[in-house]
């Protein structure tokens, strides 16, 4: 092979210099430039010696006073990083099949922090309903980090990545936690892979979020019409508090907890009943101005949890929510934090 580990190299497109870390496959290497490691195709780099020998030499001019001019400082080559959010980066790693054709063996997954915030994140990786692994780490602003390898064949096993982001330094103006879920769709990944390989690029990126959420301004968030739509009986303003149901910080949405006739309902009817019970419980929590509530949705197929999380993402009163290991309910409950 032309390059070996430790060789000094130059990136042809930018002129940046670095070194070879390792070969990924027969066409792609992992290189390090300015303390950042990333994959490139071998034809995108070269040895810097030819440029060093052919570049015109600078001759120092003598000043009118006969004193030598002070040495000029070389400008550091800096990469411009657009502040466009947090991304997942997929690096296809190639192999050969029995016909000696290039095929994708697996993807090296990186997280790119293109923001000015130092972040802490928890990551749970699932295949179907089976958890593969848990990760917890921090990533500095404008930095990138290797996460894990995703085998190509595992794209058909319903992979899911559940992120829970928080700021390394607390900010009272922004939410304490921010949950993001990403489910790679095989057709989407196949199409993006074909595009980068055809263009001889090293990777493709998928955005997780653009900006870390801020807390919404304090405002009157209590809407009596929302209570009515959620199934509450509406009273005059002076009687609302007196007739509200008791405060509840926990609800169990298992079908047998909501109806004695749940065994006569179809799965669609059960899901509808569960979501209506959740909405009523949520509006009740707002009316009581509760700062935190917990919803027990169980594990099952994950359908109920996904539906509730989707609803929470669109509720302006939610500061953050997280589905993490609970000492009583395992991963079958979601904790919801409400803007005070």
Image (cartoon, rainbow, N blue to C red):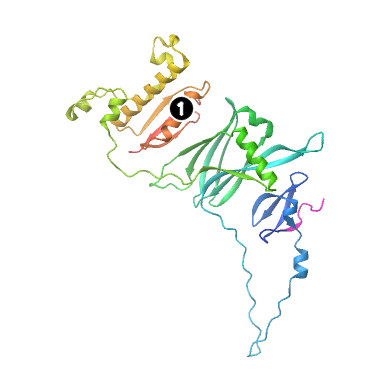
Q: Is residue 250 left or right of residue 60?
A: left
Q: Quadrant of residue 131?
A: top right
- The dominant secondary structure in magenta is loop
How far across and down, in percent of the image, does residue 68 sit? 66, 84
Residue pictured at 41% horizontal, 20% vertical = 272
Residue 2 belongs to magenta span: yes
Q: Which residues are magenta?
A: 1-9
Helix, strand or loop at mark 1: helix
Residue that carries the numbered disc 1 in the rendered image = 307
Q: In the figure, is residue 45 to the left or right of 277?
A: right
Find residue 30 and report its horizontal and vertical position in percent. 71, 49
Left or right position of 159 against 281: right
Relative to residue 245, is residue 122 depicted above or below? below
Is residue 203 positioned above or below 243 on the image? below
How crowded is the residue under tag 1: few (<14 C-alpha within 10 Å), some, or many (20+)?
few
Looking at the picture, how far across and down is residue 214, in whole percent? 40, 45
Answer yes or no: is residue 271 visible. yes
Residue at image position (68%, 41%) is 92
* Residue 254 can be seen in this image: no
Image quarter hosting the C terminus = top left
Question: Residue 107 appears in which quarter of the rendering?
Answer: top right
Residue 132's x, y, as percent?
A: 61, 30
The answer to whether residue 176 is magenta is no
Q: Is residue 311 rendered to the left or right of residue 153?
A: left
- Image quadrant assignment for residue 44: bottom right
């Amino acid at each position: 092979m032309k390059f070996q580990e430790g060789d000094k190299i130059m990136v042809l497109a930018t002129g940046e210099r670095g070194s070879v870390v390792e070969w990924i496959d027969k066409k792609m290497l992992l290189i390090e430039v300015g303390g950042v490691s990333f994959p490139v195709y071998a034809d995108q780099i070269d040895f810097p010696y030819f440029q060093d020998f052919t570049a015109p030499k600078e001759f120092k001019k003598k000043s009118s006073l006969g004193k030598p001019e002070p040495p000029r400082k070389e400008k550091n080559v800096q990469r411009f990083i657009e502040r466009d959010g947090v991304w997942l980066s997929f690096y296809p790693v190639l192999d050969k099949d029995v016909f000696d054709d290039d095929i994708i063996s697996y993807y090296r997954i990186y997280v790119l922090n293109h923001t000015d915030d130092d972040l802490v994140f928890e990551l749970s990786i699932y295949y179907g309903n089976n958890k593969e692994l848990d990760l917890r780490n921090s990533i500095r602003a404008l930095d990138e980090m290797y996460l894990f390898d995703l085998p190509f064949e595992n794209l058909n096993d319903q992979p899911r990545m559940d992120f829970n982001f928080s700021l390394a330094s607390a900010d009272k103006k922004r939410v304490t936690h921010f949950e993001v879920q990403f489910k790679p769709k095989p057709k989407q990944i196949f199409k993006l892979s074909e595009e980068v390989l055809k263009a001889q690029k090293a990777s493709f990126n998928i955005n997780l979020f653009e900006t870390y959420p801020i807390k919404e301004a304090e405002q009157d968030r209590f809407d009596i019409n929302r209570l009515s739509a959620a199934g509450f009986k509406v009273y005059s303003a002076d009687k609302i508090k007196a007739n509200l149901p008791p405060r509840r910080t926990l609800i169990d949405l298992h079908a047998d907890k909501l109806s004695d006739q749940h065994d006569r309902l179809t799965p669609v009817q059960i899901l509808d009943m569960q979501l209506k019970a959740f909405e009523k419980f949520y509006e009740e929590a707002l009316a009581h101005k509760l700062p935190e509530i917990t919803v027990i949705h169980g594990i099952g197929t994950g359908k109920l949890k996904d539906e509730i999380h989707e609803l929470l993402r669109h509720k302006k009163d939610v500061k953050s929510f997280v589905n993490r290991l609970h000492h009583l309910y395992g991963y079958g409950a979601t904790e919801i934090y409400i803007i005070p």
